Image (cartoon, rainbow, N blue to C red):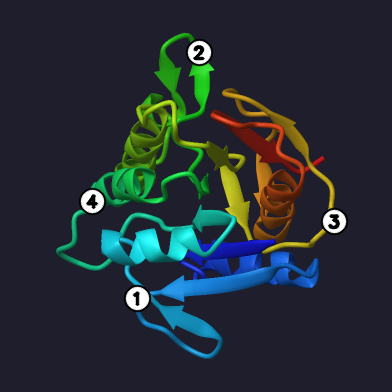
Amino acid sequence: MKIAVYGGTGQVGSRIVAEARGRGHDVTALSRHGGAGVTVSDAADLDQVREIAASHDVVVSALGPSRVPGDDPSALADIVRGLTSAVGATRLIVAGGAGSLVVAPGVRLFETPDFPEIYRTEARATAEAFDAVREAGPELDWTYLSPAPEMGPGERTGSYVSGLDEPVGNSISFDDFAVALVDEIERPAHRRQRFTVASS
């Protein structure tokens, strides 16, 4: 399968690229800055997105809110919205954040009083990106994957538990998150749905 990964050099994206390549897929890692084995491409350039989508079976967004001083983290939603309009019939999978997970009726994780203030702006940005995907037209074949509230370096166990809109655990490693995402590529089970994963 031909898979394009935007943000392919990031902490999440690089694991997705490695996991998919390890399973024998033809993977194009995409980044604005390039690098060894990486194709230079900007997800905000919709003409480029259309060309890439036309030559791949799946487009993955592993993009996150910008942490560059002076940049607007909420711009992520506009970039993801652009992807939803440009990929056409190609499947779009968004590796998103945990902030939009529902923890009580009508309450998302990032809206709770105990949510760390230092992460709230980024979490709101990923929640807005999820809204952008959800609001796409019925012709878009999309999946949005939220991690557990805590995600970071750790062991690749190859196993995880999954759910839909509510957290199913406290943490997951970058590597097991990538396992879950590539599993979804190979065996689609959440078309036009969000799902979430945590360590088993």
Q: Which of marks 1 and 4 is in front?
A: 1
Q: How crowded is mark 4: few (under 14 residues within 10 Å), some or many (20 or more)?
A: some
Label 2 SS: strand
Q: Where is residue 74 in the image (x, y as percent from the top left)?
A: 24, 47
Residue at the spot of label 4: 75
- Quadrant where the image shows the N terminus: bottom right
Residue at the spot of label 2: 104
Q: Which of the labelled discs sits on residue 32, or is there none?
A: 1
The type of residue carrying mark 4 is Ala
| N-term-proximal mark, 1 vs 4 | 1
- Quadrant where the image shows the C terminus: top right
Q: Which of 16 and 173 is in front in this view?
A: 16
Label 1 SS: loop
Q: Which of marks 3 and 1 is in front?
A: 1
Q: Nearer the viewer, residue 57 or 36?
A: 57
Residue 195 position by quadrant: top right
In the image, is 81 to the left or to the right of 22?
A: left
Q: Residues within 10 Å of mark 2 (few under 14, many from 20)?
A: few
Question: Residue at coordinates 29% horizontally, 52% vertically from top-left?
Answer: 79
Distance of label 4 from label 2 (alpha carbons): 27 Å
Q: Which of marks 2 and 3 is in front?
A: 3
Residue sticking out furthest to the left: 70
Q: Position of residue 105 (x, y in %)?
A: 47, 9
